[in-house]
Amino acid sequence: YGDEEENSTAQVRWRRVKHCISITQNECDVSQETFNLEDDYYARVRAVSANTQSVWTESMTRFSPEFD
């Protein structure tokens, strides 16, 4: 997940969610990292296999933990 840098509105600061790395499910709970209901966040994912990985797919808009 990511949020905007404090000093720049164009740059997203991405943060890893360690328990969401190398998972085999189609979803992962990030609620412990995005618990502040007053903040909105960006999301990005990619697929990884033994020999290759996809490009990152990033959300175009932020999500709200309270509503999304």
Image (cartoon, rainbow, N blue to C red):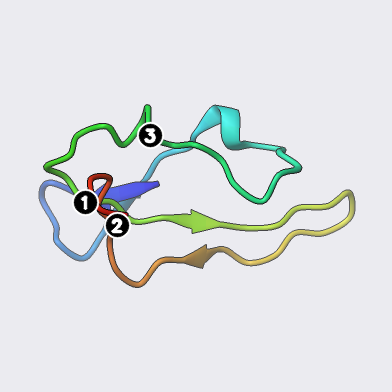
Q: Position of residue 18 (x, y in %)?
A: 55, 29
Q: Position of residue 37 (x, y in %)?
A: 17, 39
Q: Quadrant of residue 59?
A: bottom left
Q: Position of residue 20 (x, y in %)?
A: 59, 36
Local secondary structure at mark 1: loop
Q: Which residue is mark 2?
A: 63
> Residue drawn at (28%, 45%), measured in percent from left and top?
65
Q: Position of residue 62 (x, y in %)?
A: 27, 61
**Outermost residue, right side:** 51
Q: Quadrant of residue 15?
A: top left
Numbered marks: total: 3
* Labelled pair 2, 1 in contact (Cβ < 8 Å): yes
24 with respect to 64 (left or right): right
Question: What is the spatial separation of the Cα atoms under label 2 and label 1, in whole angstroms?
Answer: 5 Å
Disc 2 crowd, CA 10 A, few/some/many (<14, 14-19, 20+): some
Viewer-nearest of discs 1 and 3: 3
- In the image shown, does 19 or 28 lie closer to the viewer? 28
> Residue drawn at (16%, 45%), measured in percent from left and top?
39
**Quarter occupied by the C terminus:** bottom left
Local secondary structure at mark 3: loop
Q: Which residue is mark 1?
A: 40
Please tell me which of labels 1 and 3 falls first in the chain: 3
> Residue drawn at (14%, 57%), measured in percent from left and top?
8
* Labelled pair 1, 3 in contact (Cβ < 8 Å): no
Amino acid marked by disc 2: Phe
Q: Which residue is mark 3?
A: 31
Please tell me which of labels 3 and 2 falls first in the chain: 3
